[in-house]
Structure formats: structure tokens, C-alpha cells
Image (cartoon, rainbow, N blue to C red):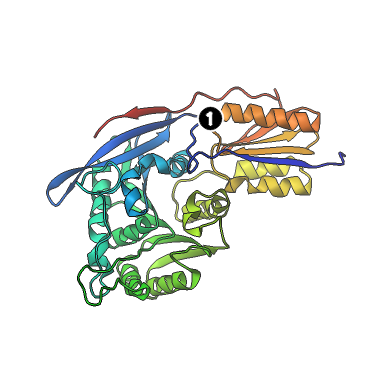
Amino acid sequence: MRAFFWLLLSFYISGVLLAAAEQRPLLVEETFLTVTIGGKNYRLAALVAKEAGSTGRLPVALITHGQSEPEKREQISSRSYFFLAREFARRGWLAVVVVRRGFGQSDRAAPHALRPCENGAYYASELKGQTDDLEATIEALGRRSDADASTVLAVGQSVGGAVLLDLATRHPEGLKAVVSFAGGMKSVAKPGASPSTPCKAEDLIPLFARFGERSRLPTLWFYAKNDSLFPPDYVRSLHEAYVAKGGQAQLHIFDPIGQEGHLMVGDPDGMLHWLPLLDRFLRDNKLKTYDPAPIQRALRDRHLPAPAFRVASSYDGRPTEKVLAISQSKGGLQLRFGGEDLTEMENAAREECEKVSKEPCRIVLRNFEAVPWDGDARPPSAPPSPTTTKGAQ
């Protein structure tokens, strides 16, 4: 038995996990969706991702962004949320990131601006038009030959999360569940008002109660204790108001994540917390995700030393693309995730493992695949990186 246990975690990040390399390539389409709202057509910037080789219609994971600072709203891009799209595409979904009107390259002459709040009326001041965008997006996606709009999971960040809770109250056909990351809103003062005051934080509570009263869809809420916009006690008040009216909401408030918990959706430590809970939610609601049994069985059958097993067991909380290499004696382990090229990650993981452990190493896990232990220590190379196309619909 070796007298050492070695581990190296290597995480490559560009922006918010903007990486793309696959065992089966992802087909990534940067496009515009034409939606109809109030009898008028608008173009919404979008990114669509799915696994190559997928056939027929796929369930839709509809992903939308937060609000951002006013000066940054023109910079919002669907590509910035590719890290989320990739997770759902890898789980068998048609992942669609949509940019709402007034943000990024989506239609509207000026960047989206927070509207003034009147008499605590958060909904009238801010949400309706954005909810219209996403309801119309679901209708537009129903026209795609690769989209099964009868099964839609909606995923939103910050204001995007609140918009999706509102969307659930409209009962659009096909919407099955909502996942909200740090969901909520804030307001600005009404110009010329005397006194000029924004909505107070507590004014959001009755709005969330209204959401809970009008929807019975399962929802999943993620927050962190160091969220500067939505602290834990406030979040609990929103949740209590929602469920008191009959809404279904699983609330998870994590210990502080990163410098700003409001951004935990793309933080590697945040993903370590929420990814396993997301998969449990999907399984509980009979929505598409991967089968964990082969991975669990592969780790169990390797009879790893306890320290190695604890680290390897965190594999389900690491984002794709990811690989795990283990040395022949199982004393050396290399876990890599979020890399730009799966083949390069495999080679680097194996070579570094062999360099430190001084013995052959094998790739035993690749994304959601358990690689057979027997046979050649060096599995076949992965296919090339994803194909990106630009078009319009």
C-alpha cells in the first residue's frame, strides 16, 4: 500500500465557465428567435445547444438571465450562459438561452431600464413585459422540429428567476417546473414623486404570495447566505409567503459562496452545492437527467482509499466537461472539470497522475460515463469540439 495520497483539482474558467469540448460534440447554434407579443413580432437573441446525434424532439430547458447594472445591459449575451446550457444539453435537453427584450442584441430601441415603483406595485412596474417574452418564447420553440414544447423546464437567474415564477402563474402549456437562482427584484424611485421612494423590500412579499397562490408547479430555489441583494431572513419570508398560499417550492440557502453569493450560479463552489440538488429535483419530478448508478458503481468497485473516495464522490457536483483519472494502485487521483477540450483534459489528467504516482493511470469517469477498467489504459480519443452555427428563426 502506498504511503501517500495525491490529489489535484484543476479548474479552467473563462468568464463564467465558457468552455466547450465533448465526448459527443455539442451542436451549438447562436441565433434569433422570432416571437409574437401583442400582435407584433420581435427578435430575441438566443443560444441553442444539444448533443450531436440526438434525434427527434427533445425536452426544452429554457434559460434566462438576470438584470445586471444599467450600463451593462447591452452587453448581456446568451453565450454568457453557455455553462448552464451545456449542463442541460449533457443531460439530454434542448437547452435554450434567451435574452429578453431590451437586453443585449434582442429587439427594443433602448436598453431595459428599471421602471419606477408605484404604491408597492412591483408587478405592474417591472415584470409583465419580461414574462410576455418568455411565454412567447415557449410558443416559438414549439415550431422547431427538435423541440418538445410539451415538456419545458424554466431556469432563471436573479430577476430572471422572479420572471419565471410569474410565468408559472400563467400556466403555459408544457411548462413542468421552475428553477430559480437568487430570484427576486429591486426597484427605483419614481421620478418627480414626493417623496421619491422605491418599493420597499417587504413589498415583494405579497407579490411572491400571489405567485404561490396562482401556481402549483414544482419550483426549486437556490440562494447563498452572502447574497447582498437577498439576505437569508428576507429569502425565508419570500418562501414562507409563497408556500403559505399553496405554492410548491424547495428552498436551499447555502453557506457563503465566493465574494458575492448572488452570483453563485456560475461559481465552482456554488455548482458543487447546487448541481446534485438539481439532479435530485429532476429525478423526483420525472424530468430528464443522467443515471447516477454506473458512476456510483464504478467508484464503489474501485475500492478507493477513504480520502480518494471522498473526493471522487464530489464528482456529481462538478460541471461538465469533466474526467477522473486513477492510478493503478489507486493511490493517485486526478479530477479535472470545466475544461476547454475533453481529449486534452484526459491526456493531462492521465499524464499528471502518472508523473506523480510513478505508475500507469487510467481514465475511469468521463462526464456521465463510467469507462471500463479493463483493456487499454488509454481510451479512444474524444470527438472534436462542438460545431457553432449562426442563423435566424
Q: Residue at x 73, y 38 (%)?
A: 333
The quarter holding residue 208 reads: bottom left
Q: With respect to residue 251, does 8 lie above or below?
A: above
349 relative to 246 in the view: left or right: right
Q: With respect to residue 135, does 390 lie above or below?
A: above
Secondary element under disc 1, as helix, strand or loop, is loop
Q: Is residue 299 visible?
A: yes
Q: Nearer the viewer, residue 203 or 48?
A: 203
Mark 1 burial class by Cα count in 10 Å: few <14, some 14-19, many 20+: many
370 relative to 120 in the view: left or right: right
Q: Amino acid at mark 1?
A: Gln
Image position, residue 5 (x, y; %): 80, 42
Q: Residue at x 14, y 52 (%)?
A: 38
Q: Is residue 283 visible?
A: no
Q: Residue furthest left?
A: 39
Image position, residue 9 (x, y; %): 66, 41
Image position, residue 230 (x, y; %): 44, 66
Q: Quadrant of the C terminus?
A: top left
- Give the labeled residue for mark 1: 23
The quarter holding residue 178 reads: bottom left
